[in-house]
Every structure is written in C-alpha cells, then in structure tokens.
Image (tube, rainbow, N blue to C red):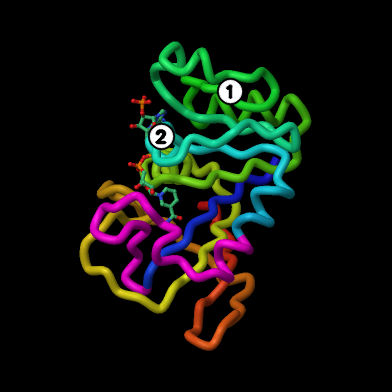
Amino acid sequence: MKVILVFVSTLDGKVTRWGDPDVKSWSSKYDQKYFRKIWDYSELIVMGSATYNVDPIKPSKKHLLVVMTREPEKYEKYEVAGTLEFKKESPVELFSHFEKRGYEAMVVVGGPHIATSFLKEGLVDELWLTIEPKIFGKGDSIVITKRLDINLQLISCEKVNEQGTLITKYLVLKK
Ligand SMILES: NC(=O)c1ccc[n+]([C@@H]2O[C@H](COP(=O)([O-])OP(=O)(O)OC[C@H]3O[C@@H](n4cnc5c(N)ncnc54)[C@H](OP(=O)(O)O)[C@@H]3O)[C@@H](O)[C@H]2O)c1
C-alpha cells in the first residue's frame, strides 16, 4: 500500500497563516480544486483530530475517512462504520491494518503532528506538495519541530496559474 502525504504550503514552508487553521482563505483556487479531486478519488484518507476539528467533514460513502485520536470515545456519535472512523492506533498499526484489508493507497492529509509521526516511522512514499508563492513567516510547518533527516526526489512540478502556484510531487527516498 502506497502512503501519500498531501499538503499546501507557502514558499517558507508554512501550512497555516500565523497559526490560523483556515487554509482556504489563502490557498489558490487551483489548489482547492486539485485537493477536492484527490479527496473525491481516494478510497482511504487519514487525518489528525485537530485537522478534523477545524471543519468536521460529513461522511461520504465514496471513501473511508480515518481520524486519528487517542480518545476515539469522544467522537463515538459521529462514527459511521466504513465511512468515518476514529482510531487510536499508531501509524504503523494503521498501515498494517489497512494494507491487510487490501487498500492500494492511503492519503494522509495532515496536519503537521500526524505528518511527522508517519514520516518518523518511514511510512510515507510520496509527498504531494502545492507551493503557493507566499511568505507568512509565522505559522505551522509541514512537520513539527523534531529532528528529522529525510531525503526526497522530485517526481514532477507544474506551474498551474499566472502567479506561479506549483503542484509538486516528491518521492521519499528510503534509507
Ligand atoms: N496547509 C495544509 O495543507 C494543512 C493540512 C492539514 C492541516 N493543516 C492545519 O494544521 C493544523 C492542525 O495540525 P496539527 O499538527 O495541530 O494537528 P493534527 O496533526 O491534525 O492532529 C494532531 C492530533 O491528532 C491526535 N493523534 C492521534 N494519534 C497521533 C499520533 N500518532 N501523532 C500525533 N497526533 C496524534 C492527537 O489528538 P487527540 O487529542 O485527539 O489524541 C493530536 O493532537 C490546523 O491549523 C490545520 O488547518 C494544514
């Protein structure tokens, strides 16, 4: 099973403007359409509870959305088996669980805490990063401040609008 990490960031690597969770207020229209396509076509999507809580998503029969939380009991009333599930398993446990169930891809859509825990375990195969030509200075980064040393290789890079939004794909090189 391939694990793909998806983010939109600024040129200085910020995934929020000064910590404000509203990403749609600054990401380009192109990226929002692109992300919607990824969302609609993915069978298995994983996110952290903080990202889920920003804008709780209605369950969709098109895919399984897994929200990672250490307190799944808090979310019991929102659970729809097979569509919206709250899990306290670690990234490694989630990976092997869904790989055994035959999923071909797991799309991890953040936030930085969840991204870091998947990257630390060497579980991420590709990073699909939209780079918006902006600088925020302050804000959350793709990863939290932990010592990491990860090498990636550019697979593709496309300029998609006049301002120069870049849709990039990187392969995570395994050690
Ligand atoms: N620009 C982008 O592309 C993008 C994408 C996604 C998110 N964001 C932004 O990122 C922010 C949220 O990111 P975040 O890093 O604060 O939170 P997060 O990664 O979405 O969620 C972290 C939470 O997940 C739970 N959790 C369960 N298992 C975990 C594990 N193994 N490792 C870490 N956490 C685990 C914990 O909450 P419990 O208390 O429930 O256990 C933890 O506090 C928001 O502002 C959002 O808008 C931006």
Residue 168: give x, y in percent of width and height. 56, 70
Q: Does the residue tagged 1 have its C-beta within 8 Å of any atom of ligand 1? A: no
Query: In percent of the image, x 40 and y 78: which residue is there?
Result: 133
Q: Residues within 10 Å of mark 1 (few under 14, many from 20)?
A: some
Secondary structure category for the residue under label 2:
helix
Q: Is mark 1 on a helix, strand or loop?
A: strand
Residue 83 is one of the magenta-drawn residues: no
Q: How far is mark 1 from mark 2, CA to CA?
A: 14 Å
* Vertical arrangement, residue 99 with respect to residue 78, above or below: below
Q: Position of residue 113 (x, y in %)?
A: 36, 41
Q: In this view, does 35 lie to the left or right of 110?
A: right
Asked which quadrant contains residue 126, the reply is: bottom right
Tag 2: residue type?
A: Asn
Q: In the rendering, at what x and y percent does residue 57 appear? A: 54, 36
Q: In which quarter of the image is residue 58?
A: top right
Say the numbered circle drawn on residue 104.
none
The rendered magenta stretch, by its main secondary structure, is classed as loop
Q: Which of marks 1 and 2 is nearer the N terminus?
A: 2
Note whether 113 is above or below 79 in the view shown. Answer: below
Determine which residue is flagged by label 1. Answer: 85
Please tell me whether residue 25 belongs to the stretch shown in magenta.
Answer: yes
Ligand 1 quadrant in view? top left
Q: On residue 53, which mark appears? A: 2
Magenta span of residues: 11-34
* Residue in the foreground of this view, choosing between 57 and 35: 57
The answer to whether the residues at label 1 and label 2 have Cβ atoms under 8 Å apart is no
Residue plotted at (29% across, 53% down) = 20
Q: Residue at x 27, y 69 (%)?
A: 136
The amino acid beneath tag 1 is Glu
In this rendering, the answer to whether 89 lies above or below 172 is above
Q: How crowded is mark 2: few (under 14 residues within 10 Å), some or many (20 or more)?
A: few
Quick one: which residue is furthest to the right in this view?
A: 102
